[in-house]
Image (tube, rainbow, N blue to C red):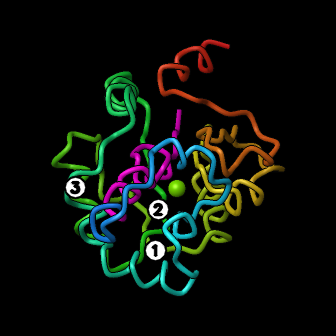
C-alpha cells in the first residue's frame, strides 16, 4: 500500500520543540502544560508576542527548530521502518518551504526514515497537498493541520489526523500515538 505522511507535528514534535526554544530565546518560563491548552497551531500568543512578532521569531529560528534536536514522536520511526520492510511505499508531503527541501531530506535520511527521492514532496501550500495525494492514489495519509485536513474530507484516501489540541474540530479519524497504526491497519 501507499502511505503518505506530513512531517511537522505529525511525525516529529516540532511545535513542542519550538515551544522550548521560544522559552530559551525569550528568557521566559512558560510551562509545557500551557502548550496542551493552545488551540491554534501557532504558539506565539502565550509568549506575549503579536502574530507578526511570532512570525518573525519563527523564521529567525527555523533552521534551529527544524534541524538541531527536534524529537521524533514515539513509535513513528519504528512504524515507518516496519511499513517499509513490509514492502509498503512511504511518501512525505511537507509544506516546509522549498529552500528547506535538501536539508529536510538529509535530516530524514540521517535519522533512519525510509527515503526515496521520488517519494518526497516539499514546498506546496496547504490546498495543494490534496492534488499530490490524489495523483499518488495514496491508501493512507496522515497530517495534523486543520487547514489541510479540511481539504481531504471527501477523497478515497483514508485520512487520519495526528491528534492535537488544535485539530479537535476536524471530523476525521485520529491517532494519538503511532502505536495505534497497527490496530488501524488490522481493521
Ligand atoms: Mg504538520
Q: Which residues are magenta?
A: 1-22
Residue 99 x, y percent position in the rendering:
32, 80
- Quarter of the image with the C terminus in it: top right
The residue at the point 61 percent across, 64 percent down is: 129
Verify CB contact (< 8 Å) between mark 3 and mark 1. Answer: no
Question: Which residue matches tag 3?
Answer: 107
Residue 6 in the magenta stretch? The answer is yes
Verify CB contact (< 8 Å) between mark 1 and mark 2. Answer: yes
Q: In terms of depth relative to the viewer, which is nearer, 58 or 144? A: 58
Q: Disc number at residue 37?
A: none
Mark 3 near ligand 1 (CB under 8 Å)?
no
First of labels 2, 3 by sequence position: 2
Question: Which residue matches tag 2?
Answer: 94
Verify CB contact (< 8 Å) between mark 2 and mark 3. Answer: no
In the rendered view, would you say 42 is above or below 60? above
In the rendered view, would you say 116 is above or below 66? above
Mark 2 near ligand 1 (CB under 8 Å)?
yes
Question: Which residue matches tag 1?
Answer: 123
The furthest residue to the left: 110
- Using the rendered view, name the quadrant where residue 85 is placed: top left
Amino acid at each position: 500500500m501507499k502511505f503518505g505522511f506530513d512531517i511537522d507535528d505529525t511525525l516529529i514534535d516540532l511545535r513542542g520543540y519550538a515551544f522550548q526554544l521560544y522559552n530559551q530565546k525569550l528568557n521566559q518560563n512558560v510551562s509545557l502544560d500551557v502548550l496542551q491548552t493552545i488551540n491554534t497551531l501557532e504558539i506565539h500568543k502565550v509568549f506575549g508576542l503579536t502574530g507578526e512578532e511570532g512570525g518573525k521569531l519563527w523564521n529567525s529560528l527555523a533552521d534551529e527548530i527544524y534541524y538541531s534536536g527536534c524529537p521524533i514522536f514515539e513509535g513513528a520511526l519504528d512504524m515507518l521502518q516496519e511499513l517499509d520492510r513490509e514492502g509498503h511505499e512511504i511518501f512525505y508531503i511537507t509544506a516546509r518551504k522549498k529552500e528547506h527541501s535538501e536539508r529536510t531530506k538529509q535530516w530524514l535520511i540521517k535519522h533512519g526514515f525510509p527515503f526515496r527521492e521520488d517519494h518526497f514532496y516539499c514546498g506546496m501550500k496547504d490546498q495543494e497537498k490534496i492534488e499530490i495525494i490524489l495523483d499518488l492514489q495514496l491508501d493512507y495519509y496522515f497530517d495534523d493541520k486543520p487547514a489541510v485536513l479540511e481539504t481531504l474530507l471527501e477523497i478515497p484516501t483514508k485520512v487520519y489526523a495526528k491528534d492535537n489540541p488544535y485539530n479537535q474540530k476536524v471530523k476525521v479519524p485520529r491517532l494519538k500515538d503511532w502505536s495505534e497504526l497497527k490496530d488501524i491497519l488490522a481493521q
